[in-house]
Image: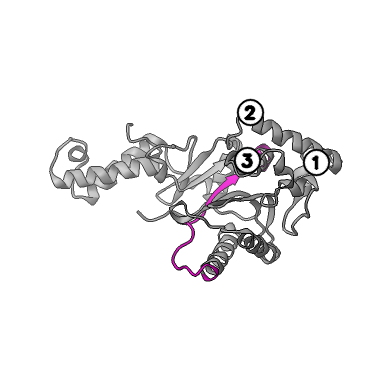
Amino acid sequence: MARGARLDTSNAVHHVIARGIERRKIFDDADDRQDFLARLTPIAHDFGLRVYAWSVLPNHLHLLVRTGDIGLSRCMHRLLAGYAGHFNRRHQRCGYLFQNRFKSILVDQHAYLLELVRYIHLNPVRAGIVSLDALDEYPWTGHAALLGRREVPRWMDTKTVLEQFTPDLAAAAARYRTFVQAGMAGACDPPPDSGVAQFHGHWSLLPVVRRGREAWAFVERLVGTPAFADAVRHTLAPPTAFAPSRPAQTEAVLTATAAQFGLTREELVSGGHCLQIRLARNAALRDLVRRCGLSFAQ
């Protein structure tokens, strides 16, 4: 099935995740990590990218970024393609380094910025790579830079994060550290997300993104309040062009699929077992999941 368009808007906050193909390593040693981080400097300058949080683990990476006037896809293509080429040459390998394309989730900065900063910076602790106490000096996340324990990369915006606690940056760093430790003491899961899906070329809001076998159906996710999700939807399609309600979507899918396979709607839903009906029914099920937000059970 063809991939849908990425939910990519300029001047927005995105949580970016990239994983190694077949869960293999994308960072073998410190030189790999340094090379990746160094590549962020010219990209941040050229594209107006600001990084609020980051974490590079052996087989995946997280970035929490705000884009400039240029969308996220161009920035990440330059970053990941350049790094993958250098990694392959350095380690004398060929082929894909990353698993599929990177994942990006549009984020409501006002509601979830700090939660995601904490979640991203605690990744190495949850993975058992570093202890919580050692995280304060750990070089492969942005946590130590926020605490003032390590040099702040030119592309990292620590001020925006710390000012969420207090304008006094020294006091803010201490509060930030307490905030991170509290996240590890309790459950620190990523914030819940909703989704948007395309239907006949327009965007439709899905209050819940399914996690089971239907997860493939949702191309784009976002993290934020219902008001934020609705505001995002308005930027993606004119209000008058929004998708119809779910019952109308369902009927439209059934009618269109039946016509595509030369059947009537009644034949499509009849439960018949001839090959044409089975193929049409499978196609309709895929569209009902992907376009209408239904589960397979529904």
Give whichever of discs 3 and 1 has the lower sequence position.
3
Residue 10 can be seen, yes or no: yes
Is 73 displayed left or right of 37 in the figure?
A: left
Three-letter code for the amino acid on which mark 3 is drawn: Val
Three-letter code for the amino acid on which mark 2 is drawn: Gly
Three-letter code for the amino acid on which mark 1 is drawn: Ala
Give whichever of discs 2 and 1 has the lower sequence position.
1
Say which residue label 2 marks.
Answer: 186
Q: Secondary structure at mark 3?
A: helix
Q: Position of residue 93 (x, y in %)?
A: 47, 68
Crowding near the residue tagged with mark 1, few <14, some 14–19, many ≥20 C-alpha atoms within 10 Å: many
Say which residue label 1 marks.
Answer: 173
Note whether 102 is above or below 178 in the view shown.
Answer: below
Question: Image quadrant of residue 176?
Answer: top right
* Marks 3/2: CA–CA distance: 13 Å
User: Looking at the image, which residue is at 42% across and 42% down?
Assistant: 215
- Magenta stretch contains residue 151: no
Which residues lie in the magenta part? 89-112
User: Residue 125 bears which disc, if any?
Assistant: 3
Crowding near the residue tagged with mark 3, few <14, some 14–19, many ≥20 C-alpha atoms within 10 Å: some
Q: Secondary structure at mark 1?
A: helix
User: Looking at the image, which residue is at 57% across and 60% down?
Assistant: 76
* Marks 3/1: CA–CA distance: 19 Å
Give whichever of discs 3 and 2 has the lower sequence position.
3
Crowding near the residue tagged with mark 2, few <14, some 14–19, many ≥20 C-alpha atoms within 10 Å: few
